[in-house]
Image (cartoon, rainbow, N blue to C red):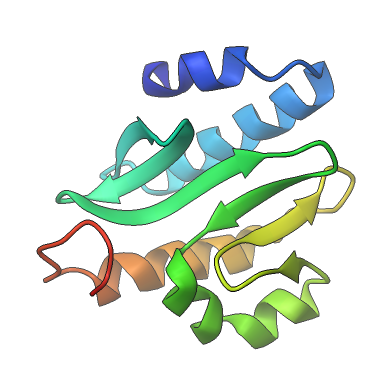
Amino acid sequence: MDAFKSFIDSIASTDQKNRMVEILTWVSRSFPSLEQTIKWKQPMFTDHGTFIIAFSVAKDHLSFSPEEYGIRVFLEDIEKSGYKHTKGIVKIKWTDKIDYDLLHRVIQFNIEDKKNCKTFFRK
């Protein structure tokens, strides 16, 4: 998690910082083959140089992005979890339960769907 230290250190709220450490640690342990990086001031996980998922923080929520396509594929499940979303991000209120099953399926889908992808983002 050294790659994320500057991002984590920038979070002012201890509760929010702990929540992000929990999520980033979970992804790291669940998908140990993914590379950790910071791009556009966001922690991201990549696979063979291609984007898999990114996280960000805001005052009222944390967000993850599996690209627009990933959101479309899992839209029904995202809405069932009670999460708000835009076409590019899924918002989870700081007080909401993390649906780790959904997060696992989203990440696994992106790994599999992008296994032959030669670009960072989908074309």
Q: Which quarter of the figure has residue 92?
A: bottom right
- Classify the position of the N terminus by image quarter: top left
Q: Which quarter of the figure has residue 62?
A: top right
**Residue 72, image x, y percentages:** 53, 83
Left or right for 3, reference 77: left
- Nearer to the camera, 110 or 65: 65
**Residue 11, image x, y percentages:** 69, 20
Q: How many marks do you count on the picture?
A: 0
Left or right for 27, reference 62: left
Q: Is residue 14 placed above or below 75 in the rendered structure? A: above
- Which residue lies at the image location 43% right of the left edge and 54% below the top edge? 53
- Nearer to the camera, 117 or 123: 123
Q: Is residue 98 placed above or below 107 in the rendered structure? A: above
- Which residue lies at the image location 30% right of the left edge and 65% below the top edge? 111
**Residue 28, image x, y percentages:** 43, 38
Left or right for 114, reference 25: left
Q: Is residue 37 placed above or below 54 in the rendered structure? A: above
Q: Which residue in the rendered view is the most extreme toward the right?
A: 95
- Which residue lies at the image location 29% right of the left edge and 48% below the top edge? 46
- Which residue lies at the image location 60% right of the left edge and 12% below the top edge? 9
**Residue 22, image x, y percentages:** 64, 33
- Classify the position of the C terminus by image quarter: bottom left
